[in-house]
Structure formats: C-alpha cells, structure tokens
Amino acid sequence: MHRLCAPVAGLFIATALLAPLTAFALGTSFGGRVLVISPCLSPLGPSIWISILPAGVFQPFYIWTPATLTSSVGPPRNPGQQVLGVADIPFACTLGKIHFYGQRMQIVGTSPVI
C-alpha cells in the first residue's frame, strides 16, 4: 500500500503546482455586446478591432486575428452581437495611420448575425 501512495501523492502535488500555470497560459475570459467594429491590419494578417460593452469587469478593446479560434458563426461582424471568449496578450493593429490597441482574442464565440 505504501508503494502506491508515493506516486499518487507526487502526481497530486505536480497537478496542484502546474494547474495555475495552465490557467494563466489560456488567458482571461471576456464577454459583452459589440459596440464598434473596425477592420485593420496586424502582423498576423487582416484583423478586426472590436470595442465591447463588457458584461463584467473586462477590458473593452479586443483584436480578432486570423489565428483566433472562432466559432462556426464566424468573427464579430455587426454592432449589437454578443461575444464571449478568451483573450491573451496586448496586441495592436493599424488602419492607415490609425493605430488600434487591445488584447488579442485567442478564442471567440459570437451570437448569430443580427
């Protein structure tokens, strides 16, 4: 019985120590109603800068990129849509001489197009 307890305890301790790191790597969740959408260009390609009315204490500016995992409905397209997702790092995109800043959307789901 003692031989089984040491590996199980080691696995439990490793899981407890690594769980916060995996949660941090995923980013922070966000959600709310889309207010403004503007196409822009980022290092990852054609992108979309999105301003939302947060449904909580979230940052209001996000950037959708081609690297964003997007639901089957597609990226946010119209003001009034609801978005829910995970954002990870501060990011920027440009439209001519205008620079947009926000967090890069890592995963996003949107309501159907209105």
Image: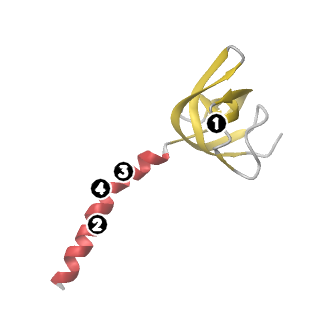
- Mark 4 to mark 1 CA distance (whole Å): 33 Å
Residue extending furthest left? Answer: 2
Q: Which residue is mark 2?
A: 12
Q: Helix, strand, or loop for circle 1? A: loop
Count neighbours of disc 4 (C-alpha within 10 A) and say few if under 14, some if 14 to 19, many if 20 or more: few
Q: Position of residue 70 (x, y in %)?
A: 68, 48
- Depth check, mark 2 against mark 1: the one in front is 1
Residue 72 point in image, percent of width and height: 75, 53
Mark 3 and mark 2: Cα distance apart in space: 14 Å
- Residue 33 seen from this side: yes
Q: CA distance from mark 3 to mark 4?
A: 7 Å
Against 24, residue 8 (above or below) is below
Alpha carbon distance from label 2 to label 1: 39 Å
Question: Which residue corresponds to mark 4?
Answer: 17
Say if 25 sits above or below 80 in the image: below
Do tag 3 and tag 1 residues touch (Cβ < 8 Å)? Answer: no
> Of callouts 4 and 1, which one flags the residue occurring earlier in the amino acid sequence?
4
In the image, farthest residue toward the right: 114
Mark 3–mark 1 Cα distance, whole angstroms, equals 28 Å
Horizontal and vertical percent position of residue 52: 65, 30
Q: Residue flagged by tag 4: what amino acid is it?
A: Leu
Q: Earlier in the sequence, mark 3 or mark 1?
A: 3
Residue that mark 1 sits on:
44
Q: From the image, state whether disc 3 or disc 1 is nearer to you.
A: 1
Q: Amino acid at mark 2?
A: Phe
Kind of residue indicated by mark 3: Pro
Q: Position of residue 37 (x, y in %)?
A: 73, 28
Q: Are the two marked residues, 4 and 1, in contact with CB atoms closer than 8 angstroms?
A: no
